[in-house]
Amino acid sequence: MASFTRATGKHRRPSRLVRSGANIAGIATLATTGVVASLASGSALAAPAQPPEAEQTGLRQAIVMGDSLAETISAQAQAQRTAADEAAARARAEAEAKKRAAEAKARKERAAREAERKRLNAFVLPVEGSYISTAYGAAGGAWSSGAHTGVDFHAAAGTSVRAVGAGTVVEAGWAGAYGYNVVIRMKDGTYTQYGHLSAIRVSVGQSVTPGQRIALSGSTGNTSGPHLHFEARTSADYGSDMDPAAYLRSHGVRI
């Protein structure tokens, strides 16, 4: 019995039976992989899968640490600025204090110099608290010129005799009728003489200041008792005398 054969060229489609079998085989294959089950259940299309929980990678910690470091640096910078401002303020205060101290010192020094200048230019009585007992120009045989060439200040023996103003000693020693005497050339070019002294406390060439003790009063020379004979002269020579009371008053001394 002869076998039935049929050409299977490409121009012919597979039979329906063959196609159906192939489809069944494909579906079975898909089912094996689980795709068909997923498609059938609809879960793959119903909702997307939830994302996995984020892993702790350290990024958040790094951000937090970065913020903290930035805050620390900012605080340090602010503290440094504050410290710098305070240091600058202290420096300004110290400079101002030094300036005020220097100005105060300069004012004090100027005041001291002015006071010293006034003191050196001042005049005083030759015997503190004394008074004139014999006036200038008084007539009498006790004086070789016939008149008193100076004034007498009341003074007990041993009383301090003072320079009436600033000057330089040009004579210190015995002077005949004047007894022990001192002559001073004053800063203004005039001369003052102190006679009948019991002791001398200065020497020729010495500078003296107003009120400085130069001698002690006494009764040496031509005198009737202890007192100070005081003269004012335009030169060192005898006979150039002027009124000692007027001389002292002209220099601000109250008699």
Image: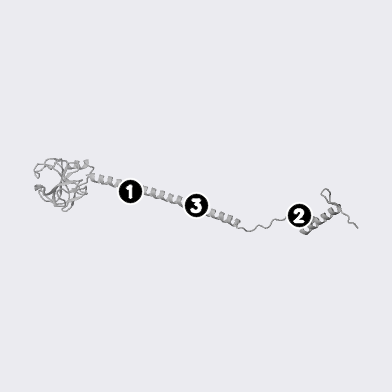
From mark 1 to mark 2, how far is it between C-alphas?
A: 99 Å
Question: Mark 1 Cα within 10 Å, few/some/many (few <14, many 20+)?
Answer: few
Q: Nearer the viewer, mark 1 or mark 3?
A: 3
Give the amino acid type for the residue marked by disc 1 in the picture: Lys
The residue furthest front is 1
Q: Which residue is mark 3?
A: 77
* Tag nearer the camera, 1 or 2: 2
The residue tagged 1 is 105
Image position of 149 (left or right of 254): left
Percent position of residue 167, x then y: 19, 45
Q: Quadrant of residue 1?
A: bottom right
Classed neighbour count for the residue bearing mark 3: other residues with Cα under 10 Å, few (<14), some (14–19), many (≥20): few
Considering only order in the chain, which callout, 2 or 3, is on the residue closer to the N terminus?
2
Kind of residue sitting beneath label 3: Ala
Q: For mark 2, what is the residue?
A: 44
Q: Residue at 32% across / 46% down in the picture?
A: 106
Residue 207 in view, yes or no? yes
